[in-house]
Amino acid sequence: MTVRVRFAPSPTGYLHIGGARTALFNYLFAKHNKGKYLLRIEDTDRERSTPEAIEAIFASLNWLGINSDEEPVFQFSRAERHVEVAHQLLKSGNAYYCYCSPEELQAMREEATAKKLPPRYNGMWRDRDPSTAPAGIKPVIRFKSPQEGSLTINDHVQGAVTIQNAQLDDMVLLRADGTPTYMLSVVVDDHDMEITHIIRGDDHLNNAFRQHHIYQAMDWNIPEFAHIPLIHGADGAKLSKRHGATSADVYRDLGFLPEAMKNYLLRLGWAHGDDEIINEEQAIEWFSLEGIGRSPARFDMAKLHNLNGHYIRHADNAYLFGLMKPFIEKQLECALSSDEKGRILQGMTGLKERAKTLIELGESSIIYVQLLPFDEKATSLLTTDNINHLKNLLPKLEICDFSQDVLEATLRSSAEELGIKLGQLAGPLRVAITGRSVSPSLFEVMSILGKEESLKRIKKIINSFQT
């Protein structure tokens, strides 16, 4: 058997973080088993499904590198096939026409509520002759759900889950206007796509029982199920906008690397011993449904930032530059020159040591383009004494080589002459060169900027303090 799985989002909005994790788990399970990962867009809600949402889902999945092995399937385009199956169920006696009026359905709901029962259809047309139907009522087609016995689903995550069949009412398969319902469409599509394993959120667990009965009625192979616990916020509540960004594309715009995001999503509810840093090759090798926990995972932004920092530190410099270049040019409001690109690339190793996002990396790299605006701590270092120290240092820098070793030796000898510690001279010099009190190695920055640019910045600071 070739494993075939699918991710089936509804294009009514962005790709939720939970959806991205579901897609990832499906993708890794397929790759681990040398199977196929497929994408189905469940766009049957025509009022809420939008082209923009579809493009956003595609863009987020492409960013994460979770790409379908076959062309995406659009559920709405398969409506005729769904209708065909509904009529097959009708013909086999596993479905029936229901002529209930809206008023009758409302009365059923009210009666159930008065008895403190879940509102449900009472089966009044289950065994009635359609010839007795009232005039003017367009019927729906309902599934004739088993009323006796129980059904057990052996879920790969939740274990054996059993319900009494009497708990399920006869769900609608085709609406009065002839359109198929979600519950029918999902089963037909999964069958026709030859899906072997359905891996999805545990909010769909109840649906699995209804869908299981449709498979049985059609005498189709029943997929195996794995229902994943939802993601919660740090407070233990279901992840929502009040916890921060819940859209996958927002994390791209916040400067997270796709590799870090995938690693973090993988560890949200799945484990392989104590391993935390897991690349895609390892994830494919190690992934199993048995590694998914039954408890909801908690989304922790601090952990995500730390993980992203790790991936930034170990990433190829040219790759990082390509990703962060748009952030830099957006902040500068202009394109980078070839010289500026060269400086940033030279300084990348030092820059990425402190950065936890591409935005931070891009902001810190601007020191190789221009002075950053002084923050409060930087301003506090520009005292009259420190400006005089820079004046004393300037002639020595004008005649020295700008290699890192020579710059450091020059600064040390100047500090000794002035009778101050190296840090007391390096501090204001760092502010003059970068605009910040903290930066990569000062000597590395000056060496990369070169003598002309470095001296220009120092002179500008000195001149701005002359009265």
Image (tube, rainbow, N blue to C red):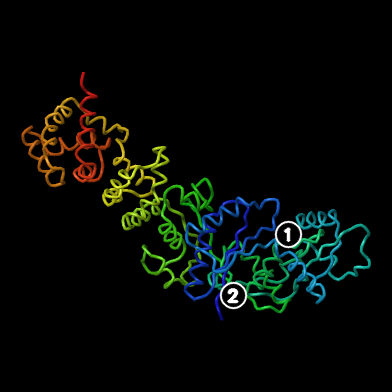
Look at label 1 and name its amino acid.
Leu
The numbered disc on residue 443 is none
Local crowd at mark 1 within 10 Å, few (<14), some, or many (≥20)?
Answer: few
- Residue on which disc 1 sits: 117
Q: Secondary structure at mark 1?
A: loop
Mark 1 or 2, which is nearer the eye?
A: 2
Give the residue at x 21% y 41%: 450
Is residue 142 shown left or right of residue 192?
right
Which residue is nearer to you in this view: 109 or 203? 203
Which residue is nearer to you in this view: 314 or 208? 314
In the picture, the quarter occupied by the N terminus is bottom right
Is residue 136 shown left or right of residue 372?
right
Give coordinates of residue 403: x percent, y percent: 15, 46
**Which badge, 1 or 2, is on the more N-terminal residue?**
1
Give coordinates of residue 224: x percent, y percent: 59, 74
Q: Furthest residue to the front?
A: 338
Question: From mark 1 to mark 2, how far is it between C-alphas?
Answer: 35 Å
Local crowd at mark 2 within 10 Å, few (<14), some, or many (≥20)?
Answer: many
- Residue on which disc 2 sits: 196
Look at label 2 and name its amino acid.
Thr
Give coordinates of residue 114: x percent, y percent: 77, 54
**Location of residue 434 by image quarter:** top left
Which residue is nearer to you in this view: 285 or 443? 443
In the picture, the quarter occupied by the C terminus is top left
Q: Furthest residue to the bottom?
A: 1
**Location of residue 447 by image quarter:** top left
